[in-house]
Image (spheres, grey):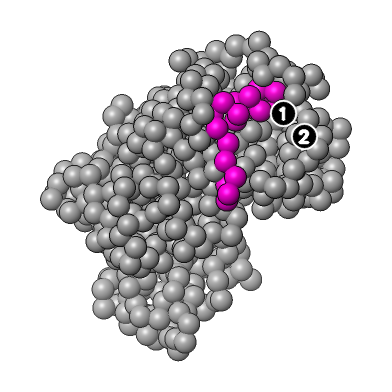
Amino acid sequence: MDTLRDVLLRCREFGDRVAVRAGEHERSYADLLDRASRLARHLAGLGVAPGDRVAVMVEDGLRSLEPHLATTLAGAVVVPVNARFREHELAHILRDCDAAAIVHTSGVAGVVDSCEAATGLVRVCTGGGDGAETDAAYESVVTTGSAEPPDVGPSPGDLAMIGYTSGTTGNPKGAMMSHAGGLAAMRTNQVAFRVVPYGEGAFSGSISFTALMWAFVYPHLSVGASIDFLQPGLTFDRWFDRMEQHGSTFTFVPTPYMDGFAEHAARRPAAIARLAGVCHSASPATPEQREAMVAVLGAAYVESYGATETLAAVAATTRLDADGSSGAEAPFSTIGRPLAPSSVVVVGEDGDVLPPGEVGEIVVDSPCLFVGYWGNEAATRAALRDGRYFTGDLGHVDERGFVYVDGRQADLIISGGMNVYPAEVERVLAQLDGVADVAVVGVPHDRWGESVCAVVVRAAGSSLDEAAVVDHALSRLASYKKPTRVEFVDELPRNANLKVLKSVLRTDLVR
């Protein structure tokens, strides 16, 4: 298999095995591939050519995968668009990638209708996200005629997908992924996340998240595993009921769900009995949250590190790391060790690798890397140097080779000439009773240039005040790291990928 198209064609061999579940509906591998192949032929008949970019904006449900797979089978380039996006966000992506077509569900049709950039594009509506909400015209396309996909043959170096970054510091950039990179990512993620052949994956996130096609969908489909879509309307009871019913072997837990997941796991041992991998995802978790997960999941818990630009997890914890016996300096803070053949190092400003303990920029060398940003040569040159990806993340490595993330380079606070890493301060403040959520950013200071501002979400019923926050920080951190300003908010601004928008916080705080 040289391309992702080859992977999909091989999936036909799994025949009547369940490929996708959504609620009470399910689709076999044979049916899924037949429908995707017919949609691929339909797109080609509408003029979509190999290499064209096809935006896919779909809600979660039984038909969610079909446009993604059809675009690949047609030799075109998949451009995932988050179904929560509004008109201006969709417009940026359509214009930036010069899309030829958009495939969407009926629930986002209003956004597409109002988007001027979608005018004149080839357009296909798949029906609703729910399995019962069918569209007659779409069903006619995917259930009649030849189930042989178009006779196109992408090469390993051809583009397979353009994944747009989170856009936490500006407009999202389109990271280009080749078929070769996608295959390497698929295989790496199967190892990192302990994907079980012919297993059962509980899909707790949204197909809108670009990374999940590589992290979850392809690794499972390629080994004949079943994927159970739990969105929309995910609740812990439904999540655990489905895992117990189907004997799930894998799931992933976004940071906002960690506390509740650990609590339910302690009460529902039968639901987690077959889990071989439980991957934490989205924003960083506190050491306490990770320790609570390990307490109930043991070696099944996976912490990993990757980005849209890496396609795969390039560092991860293993089954040997859960109890701390492998010697990590801080076992519930590390993102694990590099996953061969990827290399993860920390470098200084001169580009030289730093010794253990020193903080610098995290740099990745991997066969899974993106090949550049679509139409943005300046950003490509800044991020890809000598074939390595300079992540913009700050981190350090301990004596045993475990990697730690200390924050984003853009978020580094330099106060009176001293470096303050927001992630360190956030970890400390998160331990304070009454703190439900916290983010730390730098704000202008007349004397020190910059100083620390903590933006805190109080826990329900808490009367936490600024003095308590500052005192807690002073009891655990050097004085230059303490907040000189504390702002209390109802919630932190997050993007569709659940990452805190620190650029928004900084803008709001300096007004």
* Crowding near the residue tagged with mark 2, few <14, some 14–19, many ≥20 C-alpha atoms within 10 Å: some
Q: Amino acid at mark 2?
A: Tyr
Residue 67 image point, x, y percent: 66, 33
Residue 412 in view (yes/no): no
Residue receiving disc 1? 142
Residue 257 image point, x, y percent: 44, 62
Check whether the beta carbons of the residues at disc 1 and disc 2 lie within 8 A of each other: yes
Q: Which mark is residue 138?
A: 2
Q: Quadrant of residue 479?
A: bottom left
Q: Nearer the viewer, residue 241 or 366?
A: 241
The local secondary structure at tag 2 comes to: helix
Residue 280 image point, x, y percent: 39, 52
Q: Which residues are magenta?
A: 22-40
Q: Is residue 204 above or below residue 142?
A: below
Residue 34 in view (yes/no): yes
Q: Nearer the viewer, residue 379 or 149?
A: 149
The residue that appears at 36% across and 32% down in the rendered structure is 197
Task: State left or right for residue 317 relative to residue 31.
Answer: left
Q: CA distance from mark 1 to mark 2?
A: 6 Å
The residue that appears at 66% across and 10% down in the rendered structure is 151
Q: Nearer the viewer, residue 269 or 265?
A: 269
Q: Amino acid at mark 1?
A: Val
Examine the structure image and report whether residue 76 is included in the region drawn in magenta. no
